[in-house]
Image (cartoon, rainbow, N blue to C red):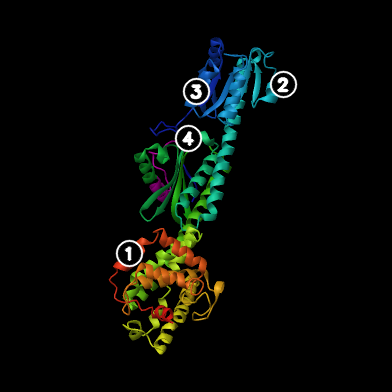
C-alpha cells in the first residue's frame, strides 16, 4: 500500500499545519541596534517558518530568556555590555554551564579592538563573528539564514542519532517477554521518521505532531507520540479522533477531510494485513526519496511488529502447554496442585537470589511446574497410598522421572522442563536417581528444584505424615547441604527463609488443606 498523503490549500476549510517560528535572541545594550535588527529581519522566513525575536539588553537578561526558552535557535550577542567581556562570558555560560551545543552563536561587536576576531574565534565556541558596521540588511539576512540552517541540520542529525540509538538499544530485547520494549522501539522509529521529515528536535516538540499505532482486531493502541500526540501534552480527545480517522483511512485508502493539511498516513502492513499505521503532520513538502524512505521505515516497523507478535504467540503457546501439563499432573494427584504453584514461586525467588536474570528466573520457575509430570504414569494405588512405600512400590515411584522425561522430550520448547522432570531427584553426592549424577553434572535448574521441592514437602501435610515444624525442615536442609543439595544453593535458600522472603509460601503450605502429596521418593530417601 502506498503512502496516503493529503495536501490541500485550505480553501475548503481544512485545518492547516501548525507553524511555529524560529526563536532568535538579540542581546545588545544599544536600543537602536535592537530596533534596527528588528526592522531588517521583518518578514524573514526560513523553511516556511517565520522568526520570533527575543530581546535582551544585558547578559543577565539573556540568561533569563534562556531559562524561559529552551528552543532558541540563534543568539546575536554583543561583546561589550554591562562589562567589557559580558558577551563572551554569556557564550561560556551557554556552552559550558547550560551545555547547549545546538544554539548558534554569532558575536556582534562595535568595538573589535576590545575583542579581536581571531582571538575570539580561537578561544570561544562561536559560529560567526561580525563587526556591526558591516552588518547591512543583506548581510544580516545571510548571517541569520546560514545560522538557522546550521541549527536545523544539527537538530535533524541529533534527532536521527537519538532515534537510531533507541532502535538499536531496544532491538536485541524486542523479542523478550518484556512487552514494554515495543513502545520504546516505536518511539525510536517515530523519531527517525520525524528526522527524515527534516524537522529536528524542535520539530519533535513544537512543529510536528505524529503517532504510531497498532491494530489488533477492533483494538487500536497508540504506541508512540510526538508533539500534540505526546501523552504528556494532554489532548486525549484529539488523539482518539485521529486514531478513528486514520483507521478509516488505511481501510479505504482515502484520507478524511478533517485531517490537517499535509497529513500523512503510512500503513504498517504485512502480507496484505494492516497491523497499524504511522500518522504524521508535515508542513514541508517531502521529496519522492523522502517519501520512499518513510515507507521503507514503515515496512521495517511492520515486519518487527509481525515478528514480535509471532514470537509472543509461540511463547503464549509454550505457557499454555506448561499450564496444561501442570493441570494434568494436578488432576492425577490433586494433592500436588498448590505444591506445584509454590515450587514455581520458590524456584524463581531462589534463582534471583543466586544472581539469575529475571528472564532466566521466570524460565526456571515455569520449568519447575512440570517436575512431577511423570506421575501421570504411576498407578493410583501407589500415588495415593496413605503409608510408606515398600521397595517394589518405591522402584515404581522412581519411574516418574523417566516417564516425565519421555513425555517432555517430544517438544524442544520444553527442554528445560524435561531436565527438571528427569533430574530433580539427583543428589549432590551422586546417590540420587535415575542417573546417579553427581555435583555440577546435575542440571542447575534441577539443583534448584531439589532444594525447594524437599522443603515444601516437609512443611506440608501429606497422607503419610503431618507437616513438619519450620525449624525441623530448616535443619533437614542444613543436614542435606553437600549431601543431597549443592551447598551454595542450600545456603542461599536458608538465607531467603532467614530474611522472610518466602514466609508467604511457607504459610500457604502450613495452611493448605491438602490431604496428600505422593512424592514418597522424597520421604523414602530422607528415611534412609
- The residue positioned farthest toward the left in the image shown: 513
Q: Which of the two discs, 3 and 4, labels the residue nearer the N terminus?
A: 3
Where is mark 1, residue-wise? 507
* Residue under the point 43% across and 61% down: 496
* Residue 14 belongs to the span the image colors magenta: no
Q: Marks 3 and 2, how far apart in space? A: 29 Å
For the residue labelled by badge 1, is the local secondary structure a helix, a strand or a loop? Answer: helix
Where is mark 4, residue-wise? 205
Residue 133, placed above or below residue 262: above
Q: Which of the two discs, 1 and 3, labels the residue nearer the N terminus?
A: 3
Q: Marks 2 and 1, how far apart in space? A: 79 Å
Q: Give coordinates of residue 343: x percent, y percent.
A: 40, 68
Q: Please name which of the two marks, 1 or 4, marks the residue nearer to the observer.
A: 1
Where is mark 3, residue-wise? 65
Per the rendered image, the range of residues in magenta is: 246-262
For the residue labelled by badge 4, is the local secondary structure a helix, a strand or a loop? Answer: helix
Q: Give coordinates of residue 123: x percent, y percent.
A: 68, 25
Q: Give coordinates of residue 516: x percent, y percent.
A: 31, 77
Q: Which of the two discs, 1 and 4, labels the residue nearer the N terminus?
A: 4
Residue 387, placed above or below residue 285: below
Q: Which label is found at residue 118?
A: 2
Q: How many neighbours does mark 4 have within 10 angstroms: few (below 14), some (14-19), or many (20 or more)? A: some
Q: Say whether residue 297 is left or right of residue 84.
A: left
Amino acid at each position: 500500500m502506498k503512502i496516503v498523503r493529503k495536501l490541500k490549500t485550505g480553501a475548503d476549510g481544512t485545518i492547516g499545519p501548525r507553524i511555529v517560528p524560529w526563536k532568535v535572541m538579540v542581546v545588545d545594550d544599544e536600543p537602536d541596534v535592537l530596533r534596527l535588527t528588528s526592522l531588517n529581519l521583518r518578514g524573514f522566513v526560513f523553511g516556511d517558518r517565520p522568526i520570533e525575536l527575543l530581546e535582551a539588553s544585558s547578559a543577565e537578561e539573556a540568561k533569563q530568556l534562556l531559562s524561559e526558552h529552551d528552543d532558541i535557535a540563534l543568539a546575536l550577542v554583543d561583546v561589550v555590555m554591562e562589562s567589557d567581556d559580558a558577551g563572551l562570558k554569556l557564550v561560556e555560560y551557554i556552552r559550558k554551564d547550560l551545555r547547549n551545543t545546538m544554539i548558534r552563536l554569532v558575536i556582534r561587536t562595535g568595538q573589535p579592538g576590545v575583542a579581536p576576531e581571531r582571538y575570539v574565534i580561537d578561544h570561544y565556541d562561536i559560529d560567526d563573528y561580525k563587526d556591526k558596521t558591516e552588518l547591512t540588511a543583506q548581510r544580516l539576512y545571510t548571517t541569520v539564514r546560514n545560522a538557522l540552517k546550521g541549527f536545523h541540520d544539527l537538530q535533524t542529525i541529533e534527532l536521527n542519532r537519538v532515534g537510531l540509538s533507541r532502535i538499536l538499544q531496544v532491538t536485541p530485547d524486542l523479542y523478550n517477554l518484556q512487552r514494554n520494549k515495543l513502545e520504546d522501539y516505536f518511539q525510536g522509529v517515530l523519531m527517525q521518521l520525524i528526522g527524515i521529515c527534516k524537522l529536528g528536535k524542535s520539530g519533535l516538540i513544537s512543529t510536528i505532531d505524529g503517532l504510531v499505532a497498532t491494530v489488533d482486531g477492533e483494538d487500536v493502541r497508540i504506541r508512540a507520540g510526538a508533539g500534540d500526540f505526546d501523552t504528556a501534552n494532554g489532548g486525549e480527545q484529539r488523539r482518539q479522533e485521529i486514531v478513528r480517522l486514520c483507521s478509516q483511512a488505511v481501510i479505504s485508502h482515502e484520507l478524511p477531510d478533517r485531517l490537517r493539511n499535509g497529513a500523512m498516513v503510512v500503513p504498517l502492513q504485512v502480507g496484505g494485513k494492516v497491523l497499524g499505521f504511522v500518522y504524521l503532520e508535515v508542513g514541508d513538502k517531502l521529496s519522492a526519496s523522502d517519501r520512499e524512505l518513510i515507507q521503507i521505515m514503515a515496512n521495517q516497523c511492520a515486519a518487527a511488529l509481525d515478528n514480535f507478535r509471532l514470537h509472543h504467540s509461540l511463547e503464549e503457546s509454550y505457557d499454555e502447554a506448561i499450564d496444561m501439563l501442570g493441570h494434568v499432573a494436578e488432576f492425577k494427584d490433586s494433592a500436588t496442585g498448590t505444591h506445584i504453584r509454590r515450587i514455581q514461586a520458590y524456584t524463581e525467588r531462589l534463582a534471583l537470589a543466586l544472581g539469575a536474570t529475571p528472564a532466566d528466573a521466570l524460565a526456571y520457575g515455569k520449568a519447575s511446574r512440570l517436575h512431577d509430570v511423570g506421575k501421570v504414569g504411576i498407578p493410583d494405588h501407589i500415588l495415593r497410598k496413605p503409608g510408606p512405600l515398600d521397595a517394589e512400590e518405591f522402584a515404581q515411584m522412581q519411574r516418574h522421572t523417566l516417564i516425565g522425561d519421555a513425555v517432555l522430550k517430544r517438544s524442544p520448547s520444553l527442554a528445560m522442563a524435561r531436565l527438571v522432570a528427569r533430574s530433580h531427584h539427583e543428589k549432590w553426592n551422586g546417590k540420587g536417581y535415575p542417573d546417579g549424577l553427581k555435583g555440577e553434572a546435575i542440571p542447575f535448574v534441577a539443583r534448584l528444584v531439589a532444594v525447594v521441592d524437599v522443603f515444601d514437602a516437609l512443611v506440608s501435610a501429606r497422607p503419610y505424615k503431618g507437616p513438619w515444624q519450620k525449624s525441623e525442615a530448616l535443619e533437614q536442609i542444613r543436614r542435606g547441604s553437600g549431601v543431597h543439595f549443592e551447598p551454595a544453593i542450600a545456603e542461599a535458600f536458608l538465607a531467603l527463609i532467614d530474611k522472610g522472603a518466602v514466609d508467604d509460601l511457607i504459610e500457604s503450605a502450613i495452611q493448605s488443606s491438602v490431604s496428600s502429596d505422593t512424592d514418597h521418593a522424597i520421604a523414602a530417601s530422607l528415611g534412609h
